[in-house]
């Protein structure tokens, strides 16, 4: 384990703002950031191309995370389907844990970071918001990219993935017992980020 590692685990349901908060927190503290959803999205994309999910997870490379647009609604659904498979999840554990313990600090966001991947993370946040607020944010994000999608379709996608993610047997989405809950339904992204930074600063020894 790196001596000066410090892990921040940020979990929560679809489109809760984890990505924006994680990036902001990483920039503030000078930590590296891993969006673990991209791992599942990259595997999901491979399955849409016809590949076996476990073979895709075992062969996954960091380069694949940078290729093309993984943040489509279709890939999100495929991601949540492969994420149910225990062997797929197991194949992705080592990469995430190695990232978490790198020197200089790391922020990982996902569904099971505080519960399964990094149960000893120094700080755990569980970021949430109402399904309607999350769907509206994701709708604006997707339509800004030109996606042909309606608000209702996005809300249905968010609800379907939340149910699949929360109800699966292996590593279901849930707050760790020691997670700090952050409901961003009524917060601007700046306010949500300031609260996350304040909560983390309290747990971080002065540099
Ligand atoms: O951005 P959004 O919150 O919509 O999704 P994401 O974080 O990119 O994750 C896509 C899907 O991957 C989720 O719906 C989960 O099924 C799965 N996932 C997971 O199971 N565990 C993680 N640590 C991260 C994502």
Image (cartoon, rainbow, N blue to C red):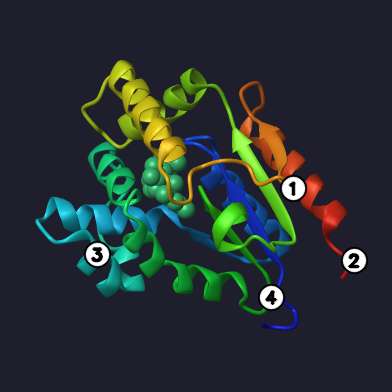
Which element carries disc 1, helix, strand or loop?
loop
Which sits in the foreground, 40 or 82? 82
Q: Quadrant of the N terminus?
A: bottom right
> Residue at point 66% right, 79% down?
103
**SS class, disc 4:** loop
Distance, label 1 to label 3, CA atoms, is 32 Å
The answer to the question of whether label 1 and label 4 lie on touching residues, with beta carbons closer than 8 A, is no
Say the numbered circle drawn on residue 187.
Answer: none
Residue assigned mark 4: 104
User: Circle 2: is it few (<14), some (14-19), or many (20+) Cα within 10 Å?
Assistant: few
Tell me the residue that label 1 is attached to: 178
**Image coords of residue 59 (percent x, y):** 25, 74
Position of residue 27 measured from the top left corner of the image (x, y, whole percent): 64, 59
Quadrant assignment, res 87: bottom left
Q: Which residue is mark 2?
A: 206
Q: CA distance from mark 2 to mark 4?
A: 14 Å
Figure check: 142 above or below 69: above
Quadrant in which residue 162 is drawn: top left
Residue that protrudes farthest toward the left in the picture: 50
Toward the right, the furthest residue is 206
Contact? badges 2 and 3 (CB < 8 Å): no
Disc 1 beta carbon < 8 A from ligand 1? Answer: no
Which residue in the structure is indicated by mark 3?
54
């Amino acid at each position: 384990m790196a001596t000066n590692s410090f892990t921040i685990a940020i979990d929560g349901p679809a489109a809760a703002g984890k990505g924006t908060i994680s990036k902001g927190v990483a920039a503030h503290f000078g930590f590296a950031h891993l969006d673990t959803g991209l791992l599942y999205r990259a595997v999901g994309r491979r399955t849409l191309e016809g590949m076996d999910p476990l073979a895709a997870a075992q062969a996954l490379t960091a380069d694949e995370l940078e290729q093309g647009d993984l943040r489509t609604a279709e890939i999100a659904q495929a991601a949540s389907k492969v994420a149910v498979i225990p062997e797929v999840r197991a194949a992705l554990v080592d990469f995430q844990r190695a990232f978490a313990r790198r020197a200089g600090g790391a922020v990982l966001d996902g569904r099971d970071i505080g519960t399964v991947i990094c149960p000893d993370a120094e700080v755990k946040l569980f970021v949430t918001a109402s399904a309607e607020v999350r769907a509206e944010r994701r709708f604006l994000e997707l339509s800004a990219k030109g996606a042909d999608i309606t608000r209702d379709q996005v809300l249905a996608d968010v609800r379907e993935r939340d149910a699949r993610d929360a109800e699966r047997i292996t590593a279901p989405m849930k707050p760790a017992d020691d997670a700090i809950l952050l409901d961003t339904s009524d917060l601007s992204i700046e306010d949500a980020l300031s609260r996350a930074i304040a909560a983390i600063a309290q747990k971080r020894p002065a540099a």
